[in-house]
Image (cartoon, rainbow, N blue to C red):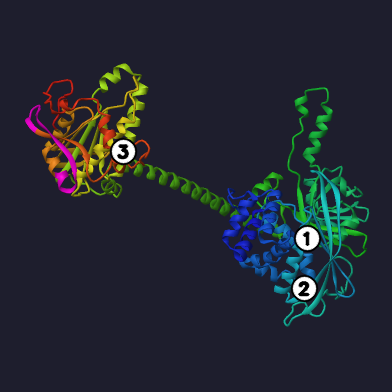
Amino acid sequence: MFGFVHESMRQLVVRRYGDELWKEVLKRAGLENIKENMNHYYQDSDTYQLIDSVAALTKISREQVWEMYGAFLIEYTMEIGWEELLRNMSPNIKGFLDNLDSLHYFIDHVVYKANLRGPSFRCEENTDGSIILHYITSRPGLYPIVKGVLNEVARRVFNIEISLAITGRTQRSVQMATGERIEEHVIFLIKTIHSKGGSRSGSNTSMVSNTVINLTDKTLQMTASEFSFALPYHLVFDEHCRLIQFGRELMNHIPKELLKVGTPIMRIFEINRPHIPFDFDNICNFINAVFVLQVKASPSNMRRKRESMENIGGDKNNGTFTHEQHLKLKGQMLLLSDQKSLIYICSPYVTSISELMEYDMRLTAIPLHDATRDLILLNQQRLADIEVHLQLDENNEQLEKVTKELEFERTKTESVLMSILPPTIANHLINNEHIEAREFEHATVMFSDVPNFHSILSHSHPKDVVQMLNDLFHRFDRLVAMHKVYKVETVCDSYMTVGGIPDQVNEHAERICHVAIGMLWEARLVSEPVGENPVQIRIGINTGPIIAGVVTMKMPRYCLFGETVCLASCLEMNGIPGKIQCSEKSYKYAMQTGRFDFKCRGRVNIKGRGTMETYFLYRSLNKSVWEIIGRERDISKNSIDGYEELENGVYYSEQQATVIHPAGSDNSKSCTVS
């Protein structure tokens, strides 16, 4: 069904039951992922599923939903600009019903260009003023819509109350050109119950005028040729549906051998609308309907067919039958005074220049008095407007898509910036703010590495080495985030962290010391690729003034500069596996805000800087290992604070801790000063 049905049903449900129920309806019907479009044609099964969902969730029957929809349909169409048309279709309800077919046809084929299979309506007036309405549709089960529509039209448009009774309902199988289909015929009896003040229908529901027009001269003051010129597309046929008279323009679209007086009209035309057999009685029954007839064969079509027959046995390509558009006529059937003839007053059914050209016609083929001329010209402008609107809609959809993609890319970019830069610095970059380099008077820097990394590298598969480092650094990243310090960078097996930059805090040394203890523990949980031994790391920590800033904008990095950084790196290089070596400044700053167990290592020779006193960090007296690493303790296996396990995992003697390793030994590397 047409998308307008879905949209008007959405309006009904949202207004009466709320937006949340409509979402539930779509979800239940399996239509939540389908984009709503008034100009889209939905499968009937989708619409029926939608109605069943509304019925189930509102706990009313399907028939009640359709009747409620029919009443709301009038209310909604009047809201969106059709009120004036509905009020001026007819002065009475019978006239309204007589014109429903033409209204359906106009909306389907002219307004929305949908070419849908609409219902047919036929009225009969009884002597008591009641009306018998015949409703014929190819969609069984929709008759409650008619009840809702008629009750609402009577109340809103004609200011009357009516009663509706179904006196008959039958279904039959009809063979059409497109195949067999089920057709439902429902008969309604309509009676006026009460006419309110100001009723437009008066005392008689139908208000049929019986005035007879008296002509002084019964002779038609024009010849048959002049009549054929004035109405160039008309047809007159008798009660046996044989051609009596026709307009001159039809000779350009119908073969001459068919366009003769006495030819059965069924040989020339087929009825496209209404969907009835082509016979005199059926046409009289639907005399108020819009009739669309289509020519069965054009002159050029017949000519090619004859040529094809003549060329049998010759070149088969010469006999190829080419399909072309056959003329469609749209108009009205009128019963003539002899009650035995019908005249079909019509015009070519064309609404645009392109359709006109499909029939090999020009605008001059349409009489000047025919409104089809104006319709073609107006519709041409309308089609241009529609094309612009469609292009705008397409551009809007594309713009929305690009906007979403840009938003996604922006989010990814911001996420990357947040991962490589401190959040405060990243936010400045995102807001296009200039970032000046800053000097921080006090900050604590930590370096860690795997001392036997080169040995591991030479005896392991590269993939295993990368996997080991990923596991190790992933654990370190968790600790860094947990203790709110900043990871500056990782280079090969080296991991650099800083506390107190760019967000200054007094306990920067304390935080770094806690991270260092956690890193020692987490490293034990990672195995070397060869030998499956736990990974051992060494750590160096130093505190002092630092210069920090963003370097390059294309691939920004937050870099640290100064002697403090270089000395921290040297402390790590001159450290001992499984130990945390701190400078004297770091020791003092850590003890100002926290409580730790430090032991003096003695004076250590630092290449290029002479000797300096350093300290080994063993434990925090304020926090257990479990608090530092953010993991639960296994009561059956682990000690209360975890430091016993941490110390037992170190594979060197206590005496080694006091050894001063000269520069250039196996555990030393040169230190580059930034």
Q: In this rendering, does residue 373 appear at all?
A: no
- Please indicate whether residue 292 sits to the left or right of residue 600 in the image: right
Which of labels 3 and 2 is toward the front?
A: 3
Give the alpha-carbon distance from disc 1 to disc 2, as whole Å: 22 Å
First in sequence: mark 1 vs mark 2: 2
Q: Residue 164: x percent and y percent?
A: 81, 69
Q: Amino acid at mark 2?
A: Asn
First in sequence: mark 1 vs mark 3: 1
Which residue is the extreme one toward the top? 459
Q: Residues within 10 Å of mark 2 (few under 14, many from 20)?
A: many
Residue at which label 2 appears: 92
**Quarter location, residue 420:** top left
Please identify the quadrant where the C terminus is shown. Answer: top left
- Please indicate whether residue 8 sits to the left or right of residue 554 in the image: right
Q: As displayed, is residue 42 above or below residue 128?
A: above
Q: Amino acid at mark 1?
A: Tyr
Residue at which label 3 appears: 639
Q: Which residues are magenta?
A: 589-612
Give the alpha-carbon distance from disc 1 to disc 3, as whole Å: 81 Å
Mark 1 residue element: helix
Q: Residues within 10 Å of mark 1 (few under 14, many from 20)?
A: many
